[in-house]
Amino acid sequence: MKLYRKEGNIIQILSFPNECAEKGDYLMVEDTEAAKALIVQVIDVQFAAVPGVLEELLRTLPDGGEPIQGEDIDPLEIAPHITYIQDASLLVCKIRATLENNMLSPSSSWLPSRSQSLIRKLSVPALMKLANVDGKRPIILGGTKDSSLLTIDATALDGTLNIITGKKGCGKSHLSKLLMASLVGYKATVVVFDLNGEYGSIGMTNDGKRNIYYDRIYALTPSQNFKVAINQLHLNVVLGILVNALHLPGTSAREFKRIWKQLKDQSKLTLAELHEAIRNCNCNQHVRDALASRYFSLVNSGFFTDNLTEAALLDDSLLKAKDSGGAIIINLKNTGNIDRQIVVEYVLGKLVDSLQNWKLKAVFLFAEEAHLYLRETYWDDIVTRMRHFGIFTTFITNQPDTVQETIYRQADNIFLFNFTNEHDLDVVSRAARVDAETVRSIARDLPPHNCLTLGRVVRDFPMVTRVRSLDLKTMGETRLFFAS
Amino acid sequence: MIEQYTITTTPKYNFPQPTTDTPLPTRFIELSINSLRQAHNTNLQPTPQTLTPELHQECPTQLQLKRTPLPRPPSHQPTPSAAVDTSTIKIGETKTGIIIAIRGATVQQKNRRYHYTRLGPFIFHITEENKNAVYSNLERDCFHTPYTGSRQATPPLMQMPTRLASILERWMQNRLARTTNNAVLLFDGSLISGTMDTPVHRMREILTLARRNNNTVLAFSKATSLRANGYLITDLLPSGEAPYLLETTGLRFKAPMVPLGDVYVARLHKANMAFRLDIDCEVPLQSRFEAVEKLLGNDVLQNSYPETLRLAHILCTFTANEVLAMQHFITRRHGIQIVNRPDMHRLLFGPFGREGFA
């Protein structure tokens, strides 16, 4: 390989056919004179602009017809040299760092010698060692192209905002399960909004046996084994549900607040008493109607109860998860749109409340297709307020434009699967921790189950990984009509 | 230097050699390799330069061009055609000489399907010391001429590339004339002999062989210096319907040049282009015209130039890619290092210097 050009933080390297380098590979451009090296990543592979190639190709096509047949008697065997040069490729590489005195710095301000630089491939383990991507809590994401393992540290997910995105059916949920299970393995508290009911069986192996996570997976299905006692609700939580999920206007919300406090003071906070209080409320007819309709929405969801024993499971699960780690799976599969928002509002309110009171240390929240149940204002909360409470969210979506731009800008880690659509790639490339060219170029060519990992977990060295398989009952497959 | 792999490690880049048993003079290969061995571990200043044989200073006297076109209707009687062309290129200069490459191509057309055979490239390191041996040995092996060993017989160093290419071209023409029957043979250039690179007996032998096998040789010149009344003969085109031939008369050449063909101007396509066409003068007039008509009926003649000959020219021409490959070859196989010396013109005259390769 030969150093050819450098423009800004792009380096072009001439590579010959037997020096196979592909997109995503890392190379080290070492200048022994300067005692420094550039760490670069291949983001595109092009044909080298070898002079005369076009003529070479054209001359075998007389009048644009089929290739002319013939034979070459080439006693000196020059032909292999011709094809060798013809097949030379140009590696377009992004400078990722400078290595000096075994220390990495994100600098690209110097120019290595074009004639004297040594260029060699850098294996993932070697790069990870240089970048100190190791820790006491390893999570093996999967295998890299050079048959090594990509291991990240669970602490790099701590306090971070993450996005897992990619085309449908490329393995996003699989990766989120891997991360979730690994975090549970390190005794973290994980809450999952399970939109498709695919996380509930994570405690089982593929062949139906219990696995090591079995006792730490708490699957909660709203209105079945997951209910809320009305008198245990905090006013701010129930107001959050009414305003954000059921769109109760401000005037009505104030009236509801008065009714709620009154019943609370009288220790009469039950569903029946609440209904009665709304019915007899001395207020504007419209306000009364608004409150009544919201009340019936709450009741019809089946999520609220007066029975305290029915409503203890979430608290119990959180308590257990706090002590020995665990995942609370909120199964939203058979929950209607409005009810889903009610449940999510309640859970988030409950989490904030528990975190504020230090009943919980921190929570890793996994949200699949969050745009289907998160209110508009919540996105801003995620990047501002929530992390201060200790809620560290991972969004999983196949529609990257449904995640607000601020989320991409603030995201600490992005796990990017294949996208071919330019629009989708444009959205993802707004992430602050990676350049647009890398996202566009590498993500477009990712095979299924391969993921481009960006951000803190890989010390800003984008890595392509084939996500490892899990012996978990994942249940995330698409149900098929024509399945054999 | 970055470690480079040897290309032999990749089977993809090792072409299988043709199975055809070509009686190519092994001397070409031997001399090529031996001459390159002499340049082992020397430096090469790359100066890629395609070389063309200089036009003979033809000084015919009293040349007249008949203004009456001889229309030639295409004859669709299936007739194969075959063409030969060679090319040479100077790859660069060493301290003691030059490194050149030559290659030849034969294209055969049958039923409008083309098949080519390419010979080469052959790479030579030519110096003042070895040029005599290289030239004489090739002459002797290709044409069984006695080895002269005299320095006067060999051309100057800078003429060696075109002269070696000429040896290869005549050898290929000879083989084509010997092995092809009932065809139209297309040569590049004229049928003038008696020059340093085309002795009369050599061209005569080729034409005799061709006639013996019922072939007709047509030689197309891409450029000519022949003039009638001060005008180039290819510029004096009457407004008749193409295809047609124009005859010339009064063609006389000064010794030692001997014309072995009659000269015509051929406009074989409606495009307003014409070429000097030399036709073996030993061929009867009717057979000459029939050969042109068969060519018109069997080959593609875009711009009045036969496709078979065009392909032969294209296939033997060296591309920049091939020049790079040959530099790669001599570096890898013979340890000749490519060194770019500064271009003196650029150095001295800056932007006013001529374009250089350095």
Image: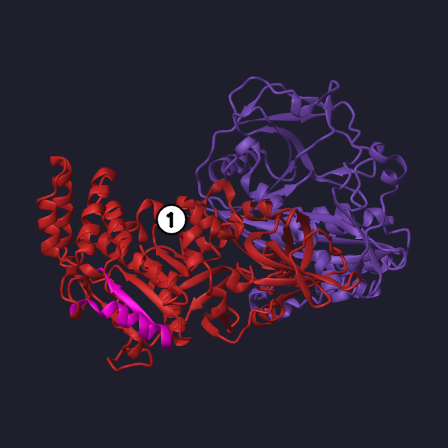
Chain colours: A red, B purple
Q: Position of residue A193 (x, y in %)?
A: 29, 60
Query: Is A311 covered by the magenta stretch?
Result: yes
Q: Is residue B227 left or right of residue B108?
A: right
| Main secondary structure along the magenta-highlighted residues | helix
Q: Residue at x 46, y 54 (%)?
A: A411
Write the start and end of the magenta stretch as one range. A310-332
| Amino acid type shown at disc 1 | Trp
Quarter of the image with the N terminus of chain A is: bottom right
Query: Is A227 covered by the magenta stretch?
Result: no
Provide the residue designation for mark 1. Answer: A379
Between B85 and A111, the one nearer to me in the picture: A111
Q: Residue at x 42, y 63 (%)?
A: A450
Q: Position of residue B72 (x, y in %)?
A: 51, 29
* Residue A451 in which image quadrant: bottom left
Subunit that carries the residue with mark 1: A
Quarter of the image with the C terminus of chain A is: bottom left
Between B140 and A45, the one nearer to me in the picture: A45
Q: Secondary structure at mark 1?
A: helix
Q: Is residue A1 above or below residue B156?
A: below
Query: Is residue A416 something that shows in the picture?
Result: no
Q: Position of residue A61 (x, y in %)?
A: 51, 45
Q: Is residue A363 left or right of residue B42?
A: left
Q: Residue at x 82, y 35 (%)?
A: B354
Q: Is residue A471 above or below residue B203?
A: below
Between B206 and A444, the one nearer to me in the picture: A444
